[in-house]
Image (cartoon, coloured by chain):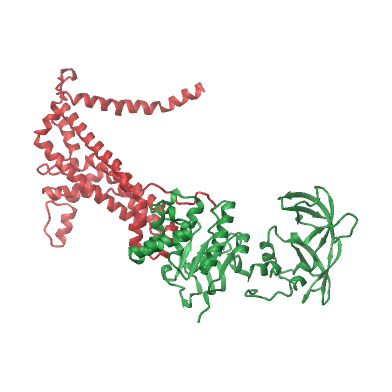
Chain colours: A green, B red
Amino acid sequence: MVTNSVKLSDVKKSFNGHEVIKGVSLEVQKGEMVVFVGPSGCGKSTLLRLIAGLDTPTSGQIDIAGKDVTYAHPSKRGVAMVFQSYALYPHMTVADNIAFALKIQGLPKAEIDAKVRDVAEVLQLTHLLKRRPKALSGGQRQRVAIGRAIVREPDVFLFDEPLSNLDASLRGQMRVEIARLHTKLNATSVYVTHDQVEAMTLADKIVVLNAGRIEQIGAPMELYRKPANLFVAGFIGSPRMNILSTKVRSVSGEAVTLDTPQGVLAIPRTGAQAATGAATSLGIRPENLHVVAAGEEGHLSGYVILIERLGGETFAYVTLKGFDGEPIILKLDGEAPVHNHQEVRLTIDLNRAHLFDEAGLAVGVSPDFASETDGSGHVQ
Amino acid sequence: MYNNKLIGSLYVTPFVIGFLLFTAFPFVASFILSLTDARLQDQLGAAQFTGLANYTGMVSDSTFQKSLGVTFAYVFITVPLKLAFALFIAVVLNFKLRGIGLFRTAFYLPSILGGSVAIAVVWRFVFAGDGLINQGLGSLGIGGVNWLGEPTTAMFSIVLLRLWQFGSAMVVFLAGLKAIPEDLYEAADLDGASRMKQFWMITLPLLTPVLFFNFIMQIVQAFQEFNGPYIITAGGPLKSSYLLPLMIYEEAFKYFNLGYSSALSWVLFIIIAIFTAVAFWSQKHWVFYAQDRGDDKGGH
């Protein structure tokens, strides 16, 4: 009994001698929604095209539903794809677009009509069936593209940045719709996006890609709590995690003590190994920094240089005394009484701080997140 | 503002003069002449107004009827053949192959030279009794054909000259093919559509605007073909390749019937206008105009 729906084994892909996928291995379980996320050019779309069969790998193997499909024709893989551009046939009506694959398969007309009607109902497209793509809004076109995939009842759905052509509010709406659809159909899906919010909200499992390699695989919150390296730490979470350059002063069983331009900081840490004097990056998420009341002691101090009030929350940009580099970001309550040029003292949720060594790899585990089991993900 | 207008007017003046002198004036003049019995060797003042006599005269002119029949045959044979041939070559040249740019250039070249007098002269030598083709056939032990001496083969040789000039239509088709987004074919690949089905169900429908454009251009050009019959076959034998433009020319400059020749020109003009009008009217049934395919929000 094969439980994995898609399996990549050391897949590599080069274009004109330039390697864009540098040996990727991963498994997608049946019914799972796996999201490939990473910056542009990281190879996530190429990887999806390899699964779809629109490109063939230079080496490695791709299995779908237990069968080696590395060199199989796209139509013989049991996959359906939703394209970034939607790739709707402009000269066909919505109904004809959805029916296209079924017509090619040569199904009887009555059966095709019934299936198209069912899909249209699920996606609320029934009243649009006679229209051409030109006469549809972006969100409607998106639904037609999804309908075209659903009607084929594939083993695996492939989504290539399906929401990137929509405006922000529609994107949020479609995201919810895709999530709902995924739950309803319980279909195996591979979803590519550069948007970490989409990744966090949609994924059962996120694959973070960078420069053709997997940086980390894991459940969304697992990546958030236990980023394996600086790249994942910086990529997952918005605003980004603050990274401060420090040096290791000493390491004990429970803590790593750091030398910072503002003095010594003891970071509680289990299982940490680090050499004294080694350069270390201290990672603090914006919500794990707090402004202390006047007169009280804090871990750090600095000046507010910019405030962004979003209503429900406030982002404060603070330049720390003695530290080089970018100002840090604090995520505060919407009504937080901060103002520009204010001198602030800050405390850190030390039990939720992150440490990374010189190579950018995580050092030890934050005590608050230590009890989490490893889940389905594994660190590459 | 005033200066800009003046300068602008100056810039367009050469065109306006050229248009008035070489298009508008002959256009009007030929219509007026077509209502007279003007002859080339006489003073224009000597011409008598004859009303529609030139036009009604065509009804009983067997040469005109023969020429008209030949012209329609020529157009109906060459236009579909040329469009199909140009489209076929464009599809082939649209393959992503190494050095395809070289092939595109090589295939486009004939059209630059294709319609010229020089090529027509070459054609005459190729199809002559002791020409290249017959020599080739002879070396294979096959008896030569009197290409330009038989009615059917004479027509064949000028039809072939027209097909030889497929380049411009091909380039337009090629541009049309390139404008079809690659992801439509990828989607069709995933849906299991064969290359043949993709051509009939995606390529051809999306190419109809270009096909329509080429169709109009080819109709207009084919009706006006002159070089081939004039240089290669001289309209013969037995007027079997006597296309209307050649007849117009000969009526005016061989038989000096300026009035009748002008009337013939107007008949040809009206025929072309009718074909074009019908084509435009029909396009709502078969031409698909929306290149818009749903990614107007950008984001690429």
Quarter of image, res A228? bottom right
The percent position of residue A138, horizontal first and vertical second, equals: 50, 51
For the image, the number of numbered tags is: 0
Q: Residue furthest right?
A: A295
Asked whether, in this view, residue A367 is left or right of residue A380, the answer is: right
Q: Say above or below: A318 vs A110.
A: above
Q: Look at the image and tell me whether residue A268 can be seen.
A: yes
Quarter of image, res A195? bottom right
Q: Say above or below: B281 vs A194.
A: above
Asked whether, in this view, residue B204 is left or right of residue A257, the answer is: left
The percent position of residue A78, horizontal first and vertical second, equals: 44, 70
Say which residue appears at 18% left-offset and 43% top-offset: B72
Q: Say above or below: A100 vs B299.
A: below
Q: Nearer the viewer, residue B263 or A4?
A: A4
Asked whether, in this view, residue B26 is left or right of residue B66, the answer is: right
Q: Nearer the viewer, residue B185 or B167?
A: B185
Q: Residue furthest top?
A: B45
Q: Say above or below: A271 vs B200.
A: below
Say which residue appears at 25% left-offset and 49% top-offset: B80
The percent position of residue B220, horizontal first and vertical second, equals: 26, 40
The percent position of residue A27, horizontal first and vertical second, equals: 56, 74
Q: Nearer the viewer, residue A181 or A10?
A: A181
Q: Look at the image and tell me whether residue A17 can be seen.
A: no
